[in-house]
Image (tube, coloured by chain):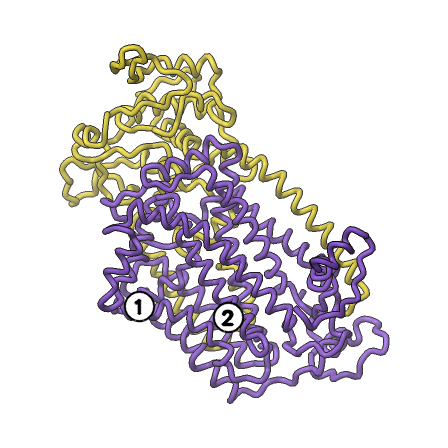
Chain colours: A purple, B yellow
Amino acid sequence: MAGHGTSNYQPKNKVVRWVDSRLPIFSLMNEQAIVFPTPKNLNYLWTFGAILSFMLATMMISGIVLAMHYAANTELAFDRVEHIMRDVNFGWLIRYIHAVGASMFFFAVYMHIARGLYYGSYKAPREILWMLGVVILILMMATGFMGYVLPWGQMSFWGATVITNLFSAIPLVGPSIVEWLWGGFAVDNATLNRFFSLHYLLPFVIAGVVVLHIWALHEVGNNNPTGVSVKSSKDTVPFHPYLTMKDFFALVCFMVLYAYFVFYIPNYLGHPDNYIEADPLVTPAHIVPEWYLLPFYAMLRAIPSKLGGVVVMFSSLLILFVVPWLDTSKVRSAKYRPMFKIAFWVFVISCIALGWLGSQPAEGVYVMLARFFTFYYFAFFLILMPLLGIIETPKPVPNSIAESVLARHHGSTATVGSGEGRPDAAPAAPKKD
Amino acid sequence: MPLKSMTAAGLLSRFARLALAGGLAAGLSGAALAAEEGHSLIEKQDWSFGGVFGTYERAQLQRGYKVYREVCSLCHSMDRLAFRNLHQPGGPEFSEEAAKQIASEYQIPDISNETGQPFDRPGTLTDHFPAPFPNKAAAQAANGGAYPPDLSLIAKARAEHRGFPGFIVDAFANYAENGPDYIYALLTHYEDPPAGVEPVPGKHYNPVFLSGDWISMPKPISDGQVEYTDGTSETVEQYSADVSAFLMWAAEPKLEERKEIGFRVMIFLIVFAVLLYLTKRKLWRNVEH
């Protein structure tokens, strides 16, 4: 993790100095979490990184405690979850923290991704940072899906049946793959067992990729709302205390929302059918996945052919890997890209619309709408991203972060040596954060 | 997810408006579909356990238990409840003596430690509520082929699909009582089928029922069927409300503890957030950003 600050760190404490000269962990922490130079114009959308770290830790800790009381066996799983809810001390709290936490985790990750898309955080030199993020997203989806199977309710069972059956669409080897995934000829005890095993494993894999993600971030530094690279120390503040404090404040605000769901509407985001024990002989009227997978479920069902649907659904995730090369614009931030900005917000609306369509029956007008929004989802990446970079005329971009900050404050606050800068660069719009 | 759309409003282009209009049209047609299914008969009741400070009403849960015991339990099991639960805080809170008395009125099948032979003994606090039928097939045989579901979780396992605008409003309105609302509506909506509708043999007309208008369960309760000793009116409406509240407690026995802790957590977090904000503002005061 080179490139930031020089190693003039001299711990005062003797023991710390002794350790640090043998294992420079204190130097590393100092460099990466204390003095790490961070753009000073980051808005609150940049706090989702810290929030996501908190969520990963919360999910792992609550999950480990739940696993102490759970049994991955089709005869026992549903009973054990109710045992946690009724007889384990604060079991209801731990389970609701974990179940609602999954939704909060996805809400935060979608905000984080949307921010990256809006401000062009995927562009050079942050391509690998972005791609590692996509890997984390896919791992999160797999983990979330398998976690939903563990309570062994009706939606657990039928969700698992529908999703694993997707692989049967693969030509020739499809059915064999499905049996291999199941460990038998249907979703059953073997399936539940391996899903539990993987559900426990994958978060640690995610944690590993998160380390790489942060490593890549600290190599190239944060993007920022202007999209202009850091030019000098005038553009930055030390990570601690400035960003730690801001992140901490945002995190506690996020926890207010989280706590509201956990304590007042814990089952709001769940499906009532999952309080019915899994029954392979009774199919629910509508099989729906958790809300955070609904947009992808809508894309799957929008395509008339099964294989086509599966291909489209997986492509919708895989396409994210090539986003850094699909976008041809020289300007990073959508703030200075009037056309891209519109395309972006329509994309957001499309995702929300797909989410809603995923929860509706796959018939009539719903399917037509799902096709329309699926088309836009892909058109945004494959047509608009390459095209807009060529035909769009970006607004003037400030020369530096410091200049953009001064221009924004121009005339409002007394600034020493305040800039002639470029008053037209950033109109005196009220600051958002 | 719906939260994301908030900031979008000011930035909608002509194309975005078009997309939104499409979505709205579909939303309206969805609402129309829901209305056609007749589930708007489910009305929100005024439950003591609703809202931020909601608690169960002891007397109501005790009445509800009486209704369950004398009516529902003839066909429905309640596997996850033990007699000790009747005495635990946050529930009907029968005295320990009363709970022991209730338990002892049931005969529980057991196996003798001495002879190894099955025998029946009076229930104790640690026993779970015994099921009315030995197994599923026996339950079905006695109920015209229909299986009366276990009631332990029924108040969380049934809910009307709220549709597009409703489900967003519910989150802000802190509405989490759709289960008991459904049970109440179901129990109070046994009716004669409308003219021209052919009766289904062995089924009973109930427009609230989620899986169609015809339910296997006959009208379970009538006015005056269960005797209340505390002067509460003995009507189907009152019975239905009491038993719905009881079933909600059975499904969510830690609701009171949850809401009580939740309030303290919320106050702490909000005060903490304000303090952090003030600290953050002071820290950033001299930094142009």
In the image, residue B48 sits, relative to residue A384, either above or below, namely above
Q: CA distance from mark 1 to mark 2?
A: 24 Å
Q: State the residue at coordinates (60%, 61%).
A: A49
Give residue A219's position: percent from left, percent from top.
64, 71
Position of the N terminus of chain A by quadrant: bottom right
Which of the two discs, 1 and 2, sits closer to the camera?
A: 2
Count the marks.
Answer: 2
In the image, residue A325 sits, relative to residue A187, either above or below, namely below
Asked if marks 1 and 2 fall on the same chain, the answer is yes
User: Which secondary structure lies at badge 2?
Assistant: helix
Give residue B246's position: percent from left, percent from top.
41, 29
In the picture, the disc for residue B36 is none
User: Which secondary structure lies at badge 1?
Assistant: helix
Give residue A136's position: percent from left, percent from top.
49, 62
Amino acid type assigned to the residue bearing label 2 in the image: Met
Residue placed under numbered mark 1 in the picture: A309
Residue placed under numbered mark 2 in the picture: A131
Callout 2 crowding tier (Cα within 10 Å): few <14, some 14–19, many ≥20: some
Residue A220 visible here: yes
Instruction: Report whether B262 appears left or right of A300.
Output: right
Amino acid type assigned to the residue bearing label 1 in the image: Gly
* Pointers 1 and 2 in contact (C-beta within 8 Å): no
Q: State the residue at coordinates (26%, 65%).
A: A169
Is residue A346 or residue A252 the one in the foreground? A252
Instruction: Report whether B255 appears left or right of A15.
Output: left
Q: Quarter of the image holding residue A210?
A: bottom right
Which badge, 1 or 2, is on the more N-terminal residue? Answer: 2
In the image, residue B142 sits, relative to residue A333, either above or below, namely above
Q: State the residue at coordinates (35%, 44%).
A: A152
Position of the C terminus of chain A by quadrant: bottom right
Chain letter of the residue carrying label 1: A
Q: Quarter of the image holding residue A5?
A: bottom right
